[in-house]
Image: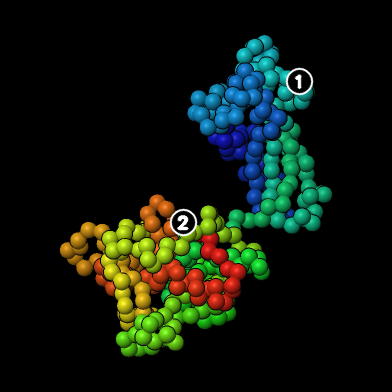
């Protein structure tokens, strides 16, 4: 409710002219955002008033709607009401009256115009205006909003039309480098730039650092043909200026603990899909690059719908390649990575094999969500 009051100040209240005409040309001078916030001392005075000044009672004051409504009411009365009435009221306003006295009765000092500027050497920090009709103006270093990559985001390699999904992230603890994981047939080749999908193509994730995809064209598996590549994976070195969002480290679900019928889920192209483990796939031919050339993927597993499907509908869609197969509700339990599908069945590499491949390149690499 207090935020709604700030918005009304900006769009229809006492700061309307400032935001409508932008008299200082802040954007042209390098600003990339403007915020309105209440002065911390002012908010402390308001909350101490509604909580009778007890520290213990103010800890969670932002979480309760009644407190928010009281704050809004006090702000409204302070802004539009009578200062003498505020000073005479004993409960809810005594600390606010003290704040007003300390600020010579200037209510506009309760609100600060905060201007974001990316370059700390920008002249706005030294030459920019410090007030507008009694409202204080402050500057801070803050770049434009950056899209954050998370597990399940859609990505695109170079100019190729083929899209994929971020499975998760790895961290080389020795080199302090972060890598994103996806399928090898999505990353395609070392050095290629990886960006978001068509709506986020200007946001670079990084460049492919290492890539592997299956070889062989006949019946194969990792035991019959140990020299054949059976993993379909790519590590993308995340650009240091790119924002990613991670959580707790993942626990790799061992192959020995995966059971037919296990409930799983995957998040590809920004949506969650429910599935179950159907079978251990000894070998399977997959048209990885949609060129009608078959590549033999050995030792993977099949997932499918949890309930019978009477119409042949796809479980996974184009662009889901790279999606992490996880335990539902437990995103730290990682079964594997989806590499493709046909109809109601999809296929995934085991997480254990992916980590073995990654560790063979970077011995100090560990998975993170």
To which quarter of the image does residue 215 belong?
A: bottom left
Residue found at x 48% / y 66%:
166
Q: Residue furthest right?
A: 126
The x, y position of residue 288, in whole percent, is 38, 80
The circle on residue 332 is 2
Residue found at x 40% / y 72%:
349
Q: How is the image coloured?
A: rainbow
Q: Is residue 364 left or right of residue 279?
A: right
The x, y position of residue 163, in whole percent, is 44, 72
Which numbered disc flags the more N-terminal residue, 1 or 2?
A: 1
Query: Could one spot residue 82 in this view of the protein?
Result: no
The circle on residue 338 is none
Count of marks, rendered view? 2
Q: Is residue 257 left or right of residue 156?
A: left
The x, y position of residue 132, in whole percent, is 73, 38
Q: Can you tell which of label 1 and label 2 is closer to the viewer?
A: 2
- Up the image or down, 109 lies above or below 202; here it is above
Helix, strand or loop for disc 1: helix
Graded by Cα atoms within 10 Å as few (under 14), some (14 to 19) or many (20 or more), the crowding at tag 1 reads few
Residue that mark 1 sits on: 101
Q: Is residue 283 left or right of residue 42?
A: left
Q: Is residue 77 left or right of residue 40?
A: left
Residue found at x 36% / y 74%:
300
Query: Could one spot residue 359 in this view of the protein?
Result: yes
How far separated are the C-alphas under marks 1 and 2? Answer: 54 Å
The x, y position of residue 354, in whole percent, is 47, 72
Helix, strand or loop for disc 2: strand
To which quarter of the image does residue 86 belong?
A: top right
């Amino acid at each position: 409710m207090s935020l709604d009051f700030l918005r009304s100040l900006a769009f229809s209240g006492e700061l309307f002219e400032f935001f409508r005409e932008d008299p200082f040309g802040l954007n042209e001078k390098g600003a990339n955002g403007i915020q309105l916030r209440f002065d911390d001392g002012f908010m402390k005075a308001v909350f101490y008033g509604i909580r009778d000044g007890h520290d213990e009672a103010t800890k969670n004051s932002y979480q309760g709607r009644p407190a928010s409504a009281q704050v809004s009411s006090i702000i409204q009365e302070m802004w539009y009401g009578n200062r003498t009435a505020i000073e005479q009221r004993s409960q809810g306003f005594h600390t606010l009256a003290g704040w007003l006295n300390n600020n010579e009765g200037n209510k506009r000092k309760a609100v600060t115009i905060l201007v974001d500027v990316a370059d700390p050497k920008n002249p706005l920090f030294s030459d920019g205006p410090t007030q507008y009709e009694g409202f204080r103006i402050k500057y801070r270093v803050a770049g434009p909003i950056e899209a954050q990559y998370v597990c399940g985001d859609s990505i695109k390699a170079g100019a190729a039309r083929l899209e994929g999904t971020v499975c998760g992230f790895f961290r080389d603890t020795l080199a302090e480098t972060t890598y994103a994981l996806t399928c090898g047939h999505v990353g395609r080749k070392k050095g290629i730039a990886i960006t978001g999908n068509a709506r986020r193509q200007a946001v670079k994730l990084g460049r492919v650092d290492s890539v592997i995809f299956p070889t062989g064209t006949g019946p194969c598996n990792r035991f019959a043909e140990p020299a054949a590549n059976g993993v379909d994976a790519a590590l993308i070195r995340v650009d240091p200026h790119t924002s990613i969002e991670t959580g707790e480290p993942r626990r790799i679900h061992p192959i020995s603990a995966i059971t037919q019928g296990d409930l799983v889920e995957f998040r590809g192209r920004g949506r969650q899909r429910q599935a179950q483990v159907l079978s251990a796939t000894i070998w399977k031919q997959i048209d990885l690059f949609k060129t009608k050339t078959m590549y033999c993927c050995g030792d993977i597993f099949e997932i499918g719908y949890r309930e019978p499907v009477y119409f042949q509908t796809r479980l996974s869609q184009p662009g889901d390649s790279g999606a992490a197969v996880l335990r539902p509700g437990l995103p730290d339990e990682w079964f594997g990575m989806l590499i493709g599908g046909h109809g109601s069945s999809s296929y995934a590499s085991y997480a254990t094999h992916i980590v073995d491949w990654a560790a063979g390149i970077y011995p100090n690499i560990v998975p993170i969500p």
